Amino acid sequence: MVENTDLLKILVVDDEKDIREGIERILKRMKYTVLKADRGEAALEILGKETVDIAILDLKMPGMDGMELHQRIRDIDEKIIVIIITGYATIETAIEAMKQGAYDFIPKPFEPEHLRIVVRRAHEKLRLIKEAEMLQAERARTLIDLDMEKSRIRTIVESLPTAVVVTNTSGEVVLMNPAFLASLDLDESVMAGEKLEFYVDDMGFREMVLKLSQGQIDAESEAPTYELVVSGSKYLMARGQSVINENNECMGAVVTFANITSLKMLDQLKSEFVAKVSHELRSPLSTIHEQLALVLKETSVNETDVDQHLIERAKEKTHGLISLIGDLLDLSRIEAGGISHNIQSIQVADLLKSIVDFLGIRAQSKDQSLTFELASDALPFFIADPMALESIFGNLIANAINYSPKGAVIVVKAVLAGKYIKVRVSDNGFGIAPKYHDQIFERFYRVKNDDTRYITGTGLGLPIVKGLVDSLNGEIKLDSDVGRGATFTVLLPV
Ligand code: ADP
């Protein structure tokens, strides 16, 4: 393929004028720019001023011969393609010239077509050389770009104040930063490249990261978190995400860490504060409550109805405060892990029956039916502090009574299900919309709607229930919707 011929310059060096001009004619018709010289010295002079792409040299010339000129041209510019013209007598010299780097040779006398073919070939070679040079330059540029991009990302990750670690699909660490090493109390000389267990002991954390690394956690859902403790006193919150490429394949995981030690301490201080204040408030309030009860008894005859009513209200309010304080103290105890003072073996069915009997009076006052069913022949003994079980089921049954209208049906059912004692407290009352199912287990959360607005409570019952169930390694589930009643199921491992 020959193109852009007029951009190429060809130097013709021959002492025979006819040949020089004959070649010029042919090449000009091919649209090349032609320069001519009748001897070596003149050719070198031209090369001093002009850049030439192809040189066609006669071997036998007076003065500097073609071989020498070829050498000199190579010294000036290696890229010039040299074609040798030679008589049959000097064909061996031509071969010698080729060995030294000449591109081709044309024996004299030659047909114009032969010259054209050789020049076209030389031109094609030039084009290929140029193309190769361009590709080479482009490749070098791409490599430099890639390298810069890589080192830029590396620098950014290294300087991030947040601890970051990146794993591949086999859970090996491929990238991490100094903040990660510092957060995990690792030496700064520790290198990437090892399995995650080399850096982090916590099994649960490693399982989460491995799942993320292999795309086993839905990438659309919220990034999962994991709380881990380092060196016994440092709390980190890890948050991870799968790394998905443009083909939707999982390439690994990226995990960041936040130090939540101070938050944890604050939380603990808050709990301690609440516990302390509650404790201090309880006895004076109880005293006031007792005294109000006394005043009520003594004044019933001669005081007016209005005064009676006021004192009655004050007594109710103090009673509410005392039970709030009781709840707060229970919660603090559960959080501090100190709820199992009085471990005994308990007959759960008997315990449930006595709670149902006790709360039955309250249910009756609302015309509700509250019944207990034992669906297994007998339940095995359960080892725990009976106060904990009383608190769990007392709260659940009291809620069923409170959050159901007059005439509702409440059933408490216990059954042995494999290795668990399963207790269900169900009512056909107001029910709870699914969007609140998690929130109602948080401290002080209460669902406010037209049905529940006038029901008093603290929002601490269910957090206490949850805390106690957790401490017994049990589980609590809720099935409910608005208007459909609520069923709380507690599973306790025997
Ligand atoms: P409290 O009863 O003091 O408000 P809880 O923590 O026991 O606190 O309950 C939190 C909220 O959950 C309640 O305010 C109520 O809205 C809802 N709830 C609990 N049990 C039931 C139930 N059986 N039926 C309907 N709503 C309930």
Image (cartoon, rainbow, N blue to C red):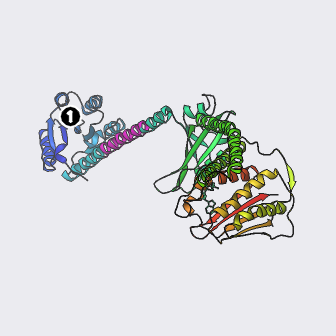
Query: To which quarter of the image does residue 339 belong?
Result: top right
Residue at 67%, 44% in the rendered image = 325
- Callout 1: SS: loop
Q: Is residue 419 visible?
A: no
Residue found at x 82% / y 59%: 351
The part of the image, by quadrant, that contains residue 427 is: bottom right
Ligand 1 position by quadrant = bottom right
Judging by the rendered image, the residue that carries numbered circle 1 is 51
Q: Quadrant of the C terminus?
A: bottom right
Q: Which of 6/444 is in front?
A: 444
Indicate whether residue 147 is drawn in magenta: yes
Decide which of 37, 250 is in the foreground and name it.
250
Residue 472 position within the rendered picture, expressed as x and y whole percent measured from the top left:
77, 51
- Whether ligand 1 has any atom under 8 Å from the Cβ at mark 1 is answered as no
Can residue 196 be seen from the camera position used here? yes
Question: Percent position (x, y) of residue 46?
Answer: 16, 30
> Does the stretch in magenta take in 55?
no
| Residue at point 72%, 45% (across, down) | 290
| Place of residue 437 in the rendered image (x, y in percent of width and height, measured from the top left) | 59, 59
30 lies left or right of 140:
left
Q: Looking at numbered disc 1 in the image, what kind of residue is underneath it?
A: Thr
Relative horizontal placement of residue 411, taking residue 406 as reference (left or right) = right
Give the residues in magenta: 128-148
Give the class, few, some or many, for how many residues have Cα within 10 Å of label 1's Cα (few <14, many ≥20).
some
Q: Residue 205 occupies which quadrant of the picture?
A: top right
In the image, is residue 407 above or below residue 168? below
Most common SS among magenta residues: helix
Q: Is residue 370 above or below residue 54?
A: below
Given residues 191 and 34, the one toward you in this image is: 191
